[in-house]
Amino acid sequence: MAYLSKDSDSSFFSYRTRTPSDILRMLDTDRALLTFEQCMGSPAFVVTAKIGAEVKFSLRTRDPAVAEVRKNQAGAALARLWAARRSPPKRLSHMQIMGLARLVHELYVEEFQQEPGERAAWIAHKALNRAVQEGRLINVPQIVPGQMPDECQLAAQQFGDNLTQGINSLPVLPDHDQGLENRFGLLCDWVLDQNCMRVDYATRKRLLTAIAMAGQTGPRRLKENAAGIYGRDTFLEQYPVFRSERTLSEVFEAWRTEVQPAPNTVSTWKGNLNSLREFVGHEDVGRLTKHDIVGWKDDLVQKGLSAKTINDGYLACIKRLLSYEVANHRLKENVADKVTVSTRGRAGENQLPYATAEVARLLTLAREQTSQNLRSKAKRWLPWLAAFSGSRIGEVAQLWGCRIRKIGSVWVMSIRPAEDGGRLKNVWSERDTPIHQAIIDEGFLDFVAERGDGPLFYNRSSGDPNKKHASKSVCNDLAKWVRSQPGFQDPRKAPNHAFRHWFKTELGALEVPDSMSDSIVGHGKKSEADKYRHYTVHTKAPVVNKVQVPGITTDPTVGRTVEAAE
């Protein structure tokens, strides 16, 4: 786990994380290059971090908010680096190597063309690069990607006033490869890490030579920019576009390492990729065409899959992965972009809430679950927690006893990712939700006391992010139980989620403002103004307790059981 810290001799936040043990065994370099963009007024910077048993470096900010953003950026960059280190070494073709060198040329230009500075700086930088490229200099400062070079004085010291004559007068040294590594090694690391790639020793030598060429063309283009020339980049046109020949499996694993999606997503997306792989007959990402994606989409339609399943499942998967490749400069375009199944909403398909009488029936059935085994306890309490809070079943199924607590005079359940690796749907899902008085009256707090601080409805999960969380089986078991009850087979009423629809419908009937309703159930903010509305649990508790189920609950205003509606 990564975390932020502060050293006793510094007021800046530092990023710290342990290096995975398998990475330590296969390291071919002990440095990691990380770039950070401007954030909330804090300037951009580049850091070269040493990779040991722990990776630690300064985030160069005292602002906790900026530090948190940069912590996430560092985690993503290191995840990409670990993915690159775990991949088998590749031997690249000459065209691929020159395609990678193109990325270095583009890096130079994109970083500095807005403010290229003085021509003299690029002339000096190019001169040093040329001397290293020709083997006339060995010990020179390394190029740090993203840093503006200031080497006029160094070039003058090495070559005198006439740079060309000074370079030509130097002898060619025998240790040419070491000079290339010293000067261009970090650029080489950068381009390989960006592409989650390792290469063999022979390919790295050839790549360093190609990057040295980009160390000439990039500064030449910036020298033109410094002189006010911003026409066609003829130097860039010399290079081919890099094609990685990466497979769908490799792309998925790199994305998975970096993003760390939920196990359900991993399982589902593997199936989606298998479907595409079987249709096109290969898994080479660079060979995919728009016709392949459209043909695959049409085939899925012919197989009878719904438009929603295809758009939100199969196509969303491949679009996301190809966008990831484009963003990391491994693909020129996303051939799945804008491919979609045409659809329109049809009457009779949208999801419906339970009727109040159905909620009462399910809560009564739940109340009858008196067995002491954990599966029965889940059926006893989860319908009540969902019905009287509007929470998703997955949120309450992963509750721990330590998150049932009192804030002032209000008992709440803190909806958080489970301590053993559970997840929530999104950032808005995290909240403190008041516990309805009806649930307390039923004896829920006694059940919590019996279970202790750990998970309430399952035995502790493995914590393995690649496996489904234990609470998932609890949710599935509850859904099957609901479906098995007479009268609860309507496909438009999701067995678990229809509670959430019902609760929010009741809030609407009570004329609760949408912003308050969203805050209680954990829906996203609908407008910028909503982000400025903050509700405490003491504000939300009376609203939650207004929701009543005739025949089940006690009306808090009159202190009696509400009669069942006829």
Image (cartoon, rainbow, N blue to C red):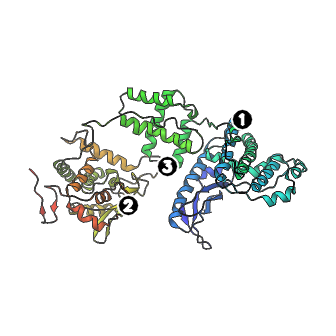
For disc 1, the neighbor class at 10 Å (few under 14, some 14 to 19, many from 20) is: few
Q: Measured along the vertical axis of the image, is residue 302 above or below residue 393?
A: above
Q: Which one is nearer the viewer's eye here, 26 or 358?
A: 358
Three-letter amino acid code of the residue under disc 1:
His
Which mark is on residue 94? 1
Q: Quadrant of residue 491?
A: top left
Contact (CB < 8 A) between labels 1 and 3? no
Farthest residue toward the front? 228
Q: Disc 2 or 3, which lies upstream in sequence?
A: 3
Q: Residue 1, can we see it? A: no
For disc 2, the neighbor class at 10 Å (few under 14, some 14 to 19, many from 20) is: few
Q: CA distance from mark 2 to mark 1?
A: 53 Å
Q: Which one is nearer the viewer's eye here, 102 or 196?
A: 102
Q: Residue 47, can we see it? A: yes
Q: Position of residue 358 (x, y in %)?
A: 18, 47
Query: What residue is drawn where x is 71% and y is 53%?
Result: 226
Contact (CB < 8 A) between labels 2 and 3? no
Q: Measured along the vertical axis of the image, is residue 11 above or below residue 256?
A: below
Numbered disc 2: secondary structure: helix
Numbered disc 3: secondary structure: loop
Q: Measured along the vertical axis of the image, is residue 39 above or below residue 188?
A: below
Q: Which residue is mark 3?
A: 260
Contact (CB < 8 A) between labels 2 and 1? no
Q: Disc 2 or 1, which lies upstream in sequence?
A: 1
Q: Which residue is mark 2?
A: 531
Q: Is residue 215 left or right of residue 10?
A: right
Q: CA distance from mark 1 to mark 3?
A: 34 Å
Q: Position of residue 326 (x, y in %)?
A: 56, 42
- Front of the two marks 2 and 3: 2
